Every structure is written in structure tokens, then in C-alpha cells.
Amino acid sequence: MKRYQHGKVRFQWCDTCGTLILGEQCDRCGLPGREFEVSAPGDIRPCFGKGVDTVANLFLKHFGAAGIMRTRNIFLNKVPGEDRTDEIVLDGRIIAVMRFELVKNDFSLELKAEGAALLAKTARKGVVKAHRPSGHLKGKKLDGQDVIEVLGDFKTGDPVVVVMGNNVAAGEARVDSDRVKEGEKVIHMRDVGKADVHFTLATASWEDFVNVNKQHLRSLESSAVSDLRSYINNTKLPVTLSFSGGKDSLVTYGLMKKAIKKFDMMFVDTGLEFPETVEYVHRFARSRSEKLRVASAGNAFWEQVGAFGPPAKDFRWCCKVCKLGPLTTLIEDNYRQGTVTVEGNRALESFARSEIGFVERNPFVPNQTVLNPIRFWMAAEVWGYIWLEGLEYNPLYENDLERIGCYLCASCLGSEWKATKEMHPDLHANWERSLNEWGKQVGVSPEFVKYGFWRWKSLPPKMRLVAEELHMKVPQMRSDSMELRISKGASPCVAGGFSMEGVLTVPHKRDFSQVAEALKTIGDLKYSPEFEVAMVKTKDGTLKMFGGGHISAIAPTKAGAEVLFRAGAEAFLRGQLCTNCRICERNCKFGAITADGQLRVDEYRCRKCGKCADACVVAHYYDKLVSAGEGKPAYAGVK
């Protein structure tokens, strides 16, 4: 069972059958496969439909060879990047990394050493034969005098294969091909390996993939069905299935049909769904004679976007308006005593879901208990089960969309937004027009909208680098004054629990990592620097915080929620507005804090006593911010 992790993740490949092995051994051969590694978290997935075209066209463009891509099993593994970034797995080897570049609005290819070894024998262009220079090769730059021969044309920045006797290198051209024999440092060798790599390249279909892994998939099914039956047979509440139209909820449907006889399907129509999704959900339920209840948000998004502005990854007001609100109403109207809802949440989907359990309580939807039977499944296992059971999936997946949700979601990738323009130019144009109108109102440049900077209230490091590449001045989206808006005072949320939420705006003087350090003084911290999101667990509750200043506290009591919310707000203030006075450092009896330019907290020494916050001057701005009264905006003139 795979959880969200860092480093490398090991898999096995069957050279005879030409596909990924999910279990201990190949079901057809009866033998363990050859091990290979991909980058964590390792949510590897099949590449099919237009996804194959995307990969094959990149290899055809740069190397004039892509035939094998269409008759072999290709897998993609998502890794961090400015936008969509995937490791390409062929023959159980990472042959390249595919990146969607926001500035170019297109994919680029970064070749790996084993990919270079494969192409050295098949490429029709993009190949450089050279003398082997002395010394260590990786990272070295070839001079023109080292080049012997050039096969085909290429441009500056293109990936190239460098052949040097028994060695091959995945390189990047620093000049055009017609100038490669001139000058110095004309080819940068990024990754180097041996030329004699043995490739089996067995032809395989997705049916082969399923047959190789049938026993493993049935074992996953058996475990999930057993978990569902054990819980459901001991509850008197009605059982429902959350059916979004995505692959994960489709798998949960297949499992539910084997676990129990009767359940309702629930679909939240946010008003921002792809037309294909709405049609698919209704068609699927109708074709299987299932009872489908629809929670419709209608025009809620467009009625609220003028007041809130575009939703952002770190300010997802739309989820509450378009999803949680309608769903709460649907459950209150149809399941007065509550419901047990089965969902397709997976730990590998995101940092926020990395610790989900089988049974969860929805803190935002009263009377809903959530079961997560596929929480430890990988994407490859999800697709394997869909194909094994012959389940009809959303046709949008054939268009190379990794996730399917609201078409204008702030979490969608630039590559997906480009695909949306091709599929639905009218929907694309409507949202672009709305974004540009907002941009004019708040005084940002058209480029700010064009390249997707609107998706964050507080830009993460990767987007700041994109801004530098564009030579674009990023506007200061925060005010020089501080503002606290408590959107939800401590109020009942679930079965005796209370939640409190708000947005704290302060001058953005420091990286969000400094806020994460301050949060360590409250409880156990999980932090994602890429997405600027932090989650803190204490014995009394859970605190979530985003780089944009959104704070959410959940605790068993009203007083506990208020205390936890205050602690989170004070940590945000301390992290962003630290003056390096080092008072907190001197007040810590356990030597857990250093504040000599950068705030650092040793979580092993910290006793969570709160003395550092009590001693911090900027933390006490919280009292000024709430002085105007809970739920009302308050300002402190801090410059």
C-alpha cells in the first residue's frame, strides 16, 4: 500500500509481456519482473488516447522516430514542475521527461540516458556523433571540435542524442545544428549512460496489462469490498456513492456493486462541469438503472465571482459555494438522519489527502460519514480495474486529461486549459473574458492572466521563476495594511465538533516556509512548499493554512476551535512579519528556536508551550485585528 512519499519508488516490469507488474509477479509468466524506479510519490498511470499522440509527436518532432510508441505500453509518472511534468516510462525505463511550458504554451522534451541509448539506434535526426572528451561526462559541455557528425536538423534548446563510442548522452543543443561544429560549449550533456542497454520492447496492449495483473487487481477488489461490507452491515444509515464522473468514483461504483445491493448515487453539478461529464453521469446511471440524485449549484459561481474574484489554489471559495453548499442541501432534504457516503479519494492524489483513513467525517457537510475504499490505490491500479471490469469511463479521458472536474478550476494545469480551448472554445473564451475584466479592475497586466498567475493569491516559488523568465513585474496582490476576515466564527460542523475559518492578509515579506516553521510550535506539521499549504494536528484539533492566508481550524469544542484559529493566525503573523528581535529565542527554555535572520524551530525540542508566541510582539497584532468584532474586517496600519 503506497502512501505519499519522497525519494524514489520501485516498480517491476515484465520484459516478456512488455508491461508494468503491479503485484509480486506476472500472472502470465509466473515470474517476478525487472525492477526500475520512478520519482515519488509514484502515482504511475497508463498513457492512452491522445496522450499517446502527445508523447509520440514529441519524439517524432525531435528524432523522426515514434513508431514503437503506438504499439507498446507507455506509462506516465507525475513529478513536480511549473505545470504538467511527467516522467515517460517505456520498457520499464524512464526514457524522458515531458514538460508543459507556460511561456511557450506547449510541451518540451528532456531526454534521459536510457532514452538516448534507445534513440541512438532508431533516430533519424537529432543525433550528434562525437569524440569522447576526457574526464567526467555528466554535465559537461561539448565543444565544436569534439563533434564528428550531425544527423538531421535541430534548433537551440532542442534535445539531442550524443553518441561517443560506448557511451551515449542525453544532451541539449546550445546552438542550431548548422553551427554545432563551431565554437565552444555547443552541446550540454545532461545525462550519460552506456550505449549497450538491452531493450526488449515487447508489443503489448492494455488487455495484456490487465491479464498480467488480474490476480493483484482481484486482491485489491476483495480487500476493498470486505472493508465496505464490514462497515455498511453495521450501520442503519442509508448508503450513498459520490459519483463525480471521474475514474476514481467509477472504480468505487464497481466495488460498491459487489459489496451491497442498494445505494443511491449522488452527483454535484457545480454549473462548471464539462458538458461531456454531465452527459456521461446521467447516461451511466440511466444505462444501469441506478437512482441518481443531483445537487445543482446552478449559476452560483457566476453570481459570486464578482465579489470574491477568481478562485485560487490557496483560496478555493468556489468549492463551498458550488460543491459543499448544494451537497449539504441535498443530504438535508433526502437523508435527514445522515448518510454513509463512499468516495474515490486516494492518498496519492495530493498532499492534503496523504493521511486519509478508511472512515472520515466530512467537517463541512453535516450528517455525512465518508468511506474511502481505494485510499491506497495507484492510478495504474484504478485504470487496470476499470478495464478488468469493462466499466464505461468518461470519454474526456481520451483527450489526455489527467483529472476531470470544473473546466475553469484554479487547480487545472496550463496543458489542460489548452485542451479545453480545443474542445470547448466557447467555455474557454467566456472565462478568459471574465479574467481579463477582473485583471483590468485590479490593475494587473494581460500577461498575468494569460500565463495563469491568477491561480494563486500568493505566488509559489515556481511561478515567481516564470515571472522572471517573462521579465514581468508581479503586482503586489496584498495590501500594506493587515486585514482579517473571519468568514465563519466557531460554529458546529460535525457531531459535536466546531470549525472556524477566515482569511488573514498581511504584507508578504517572507517565504511561506517561515510560517511553516512557526506552525511547528503548535503541533505536528505536514507542509508542502510547492503548493504552499500546511496542516497541523494537535491533541485538540486540526489546523489548515494556505500561503494566501486562508486559515481553517477544527476542534471538538467551540473554545478549542477559537484557540486553534488564534494560534494559526499568530503563527502566520510571526512567520511573515518577524523582525529578528530574537525575543522568542531568548524566551524558549528548551533551545528549540533560532531567529537570526531565518526563523527555525527544532520540532524535537519544542514542547508546544506557547511561550514564544506570548513573547512575540507581532503575534499580538491578532488582538488589534479582531478588535472590530468577529466576522467583520479589521485593519491595523502596519507598514
Image: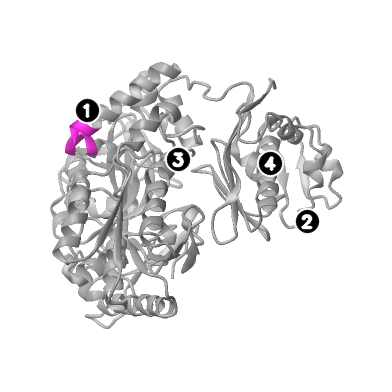
Q: Amino acid at mark 4?
A: Ala
**Relative side of 281 to 628, left or right:** left
**Relative side of 612 to 500, left or right:** right
Q: CA distance from mark 3 to mark 4?
A: 21 Å
Front residue of 533 and 174:
533
Q: Which mark is residue 571?
A: 4
Label 1 or label 3, whichever lies nearer to me, is 3
Q: Secondary structure at mark 3?
A: loop
Label 4 or label 1, whichever lies nearer to me, is 4
The C terminus lies in quadrant: top right
Q: Dominant secondary structure of the magenta stretch?
A: helix
Q: CA distance from mark 1 to mark 3?
A: 50 Å
Residue hosting label 2: 607
Q: CA distance from mark 1 to mark 2?
A: 65 Å
Q: Amino acid at mark 1?
A: Asp
Residue 361 screen position, x and y as percent: 50, 62
Picture quadrant of residue 211:
bottom left
The N terminus lies in quadrant: bottom left
Q: Which mark is residue 316?
A: 3
Extent of the magenta region: 420-427
**Relative side of 136 to 598, left or right:** left
Q: Amino acid at mark 3?
A: Arg
Residue hosting label 1: 178
Q: Secondary structure at mark 2?
A: loop
